[in-house]
Image (cartoon, rainbow, N blue to C red):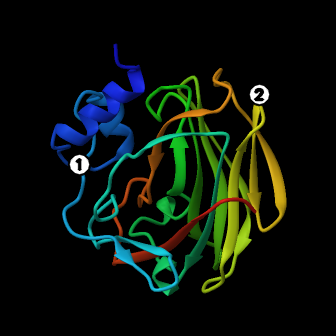
Amino acid sequence: MKSPIRLILAVLLVAGLSSCHKEVATLTNNASNPAPDSTARKIKANNTFTTYTILAGEHYCEDNSYPYFTSPALYFTVQFDSSAIYTSSDPKNQNDENKLYGFSDNNSLHQQFSARFGWRWCNGELELSAYTYNTSVRSDKVLGAVAIGTENKCAIIIRGDHYDFVVNGVVTPVPRASKTEQAVGYKLLPYFGGDEVAPHNVNIKIREDVGL
């Protein structure tokens, strides 16, 4: 018998994944038919980075998918360019967290258990955050600001009852309610929103690493 997470992935990859306006609505209100893979492309950069593009008017990055993931840690380097600078149509939404990279956990949907980095352009700087779900309760914690155009080494490391979120050597522990010894789930790729869609094309370069 397939594990729950493999059944979830089968649905995500085969069902066609019709679009929606908010990620939360996608997997909470229609868990058997979640968000769509966008058509188009992921651009391979010459330096082994992958550029994920969120098109203007969209939430999901192009060529969105949900690759199976099981590991004690996720290590990656991220670089933002000036396309990460934006002004929300509604000023109240400027503090909304966009999603960067991470994984679902505990063999579950990501709105039940997950850990990933969030990001936003706020107060004239690009802030990263720890964005988690534990037993369907969402929390986020600001980790600090990073500069446009710089490479930033990030990690989410499983430490039993907590995650260590790491940004350029700075470690921030965040509670974890998942019961698996390591993360068991699927990867979560870049997503814009919040309530609003991307106001213009947003490009985010990510390279997976083997460690810090």
How far is disc 1 from disc 2 in space, using C-alphas? 32 Å
Residue drawn at x 43%, y 30% is 109
Q: Are marks 1 and 2 in contact (CB under 8 Å)?
A: no
Query: Given the image, on which type of amino acid does mark 1 rest?
Result: Pro
Does 148 appear above or below 39?
Answer: below
Hey, which quadrant is residue 212 in on the image? bottom right
Q: Dot 2: within a 10 Å radius of its alpha carbon, few (fewer than 14), some, or many (20 or more) residues?
A: some
Q: Residue furthest top?
A: 1
Q: Secondary structure at mark 1?
A: loop
Location of the N terminus (image quadrant):
top left
Q: What is the quadrant of residue 186 in the picture?
A: top left
Dot 1 or dot 2, earlier in sequence? 1
Horizontal side of residue 15 vs 122, given as left or right: left
Q: Mark 1 — residue?
A: 36
Drawn side of residue 28 relative to residue 130, left or right: left
Instruction: Give the residue displayed 45% in from the left and 82% down from the top.
Output: 83
The one nearer the camera, 208 or 131, is 208
Residue 91 seen in render = yes
Other residues around mark 1 within 10 Å, as few (<14) / some (14–19) / many (≥20)? some
Q: Residue at x 44, y 72 (%)?
A: 50
**Secondary structure of residue under mark 2:** loop
* Res 97 visible: no
Q: Position of residue 94 (x, y in %)?
A: 52, 65
- Badge number at residue 200: none
Q: From the viewer's perspective, tell me whether residue 102 is left or right of residue 194.
A: right
Measured as percent of width and height from the top left, residue 201 is found at 34, 78
Q: Nearer the viewer, residue 160 or 144?
A: 160
Q: What numbered label is drawn on residue 161?
A: 2
User: Residue at coordinates 55% horizontally, 50% vertically from top-left?
Assistant: 102
